[in-house]
Amino acid sequence: MKRRDFIMLLGGAAAWPLAARAQQSGPMPVIGVRRIAVLLRVAQDDPDAQRDLQNFRKGLWELGWTAGSNILIEYRYASADPAQMQTHAAELVGLPAEVVLAGGSLAVAALRRETRTIPIVFVRVADPVSQGFVASLAHPGANVTGFSSLEYELSGKWLELLKGIAPHLVRVALMFNPTTAPYGPGFLRSFETAAPSFGVKPIGALIQTPPRSRAL
């Protein structure tokens, strides 16, 4: 995630209707101190996530917000565990946070089950419209908005790269966990549509055990 996108994230959240915030209940931070929550699907020691969060804090600082001074940032990491994700979502909503940064589809889905008033800003979500997170990209509606950086058509590019590396390839499998990657079926459909043009047989390989490595 580029620093520019993180800066846009905060600016967009600040412009959300005050009515949504007015519906929140529960104790708030000390006057003058705002609370942001971050819910990620990866593990706490994920290097990419920590790099992104460093850029996030830097973007906030450039806008005049300093963690530990005039803002509090609550972090939760789910390690691709749906049950843990839901527990963390409930905790953050219960604080309550004034806005939540949700990394990935699992985080958005968990947060939407807990609140329809606290603003949720997502990143790294594929096709948020088909997943039911927003009404449209132009007019998200409700309390969810964000950045869609993954497109299903990427699966065609994956096939193109594989054929370039192994021209005689005849079978290609797309592996994903439908529990931790609910967007997987969308990529699989695009994958199956693109496969004939590359002369390969597409195979959907669904797994149920959360992978150790970082997923999309």
Image: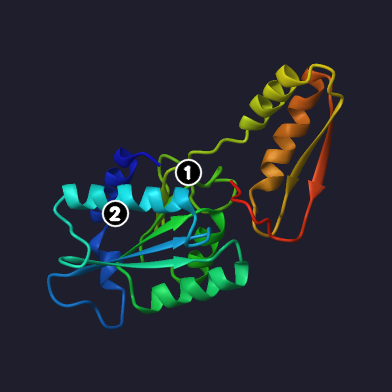
Image location (x, y in percent) of residue 188 = 73, 40
Residue 13 is labelled as: 2
Kind of residue sitting beneath label 1:
Ser
**Mark 1, residue position:** 136
Structural distance between the alpha carbons of marks 1 and 2: 17 Å
Left or right? Give the position of 27 relative to 205.
left
Q: Residue at x 15, y 66 (%)?
A: 69
Q: Earlier in the sequence, mark 1 or mark 2?
A: 2
Q: Residue at x 40, y 74 (%)?
A: 93
Image location (x, y in percent) of residue 83 = 61, 72
Left or right? Give the position of 117 relative to 130.
left
Is residue 141 something one can see in this rendering? no
Left or right? Give the position of 105 relative to 192.
left
Q: Answer yes or no: do the residues labelled 1 and 2 have beta carbons within 8 Å?
A: no
The quadrant where residue 198 appears: top right
Q: Residues within 10 Å of mark 1 (few under 14, many from 20)?
A: some
Q: Secondary structure at mark 1?
A: loop
Report the front residue among 135 and 24: 24
Image location (x, y in percent) of residue 10 = 27, 51
- Residue 197's place in the image compared with 104, above or below, is above
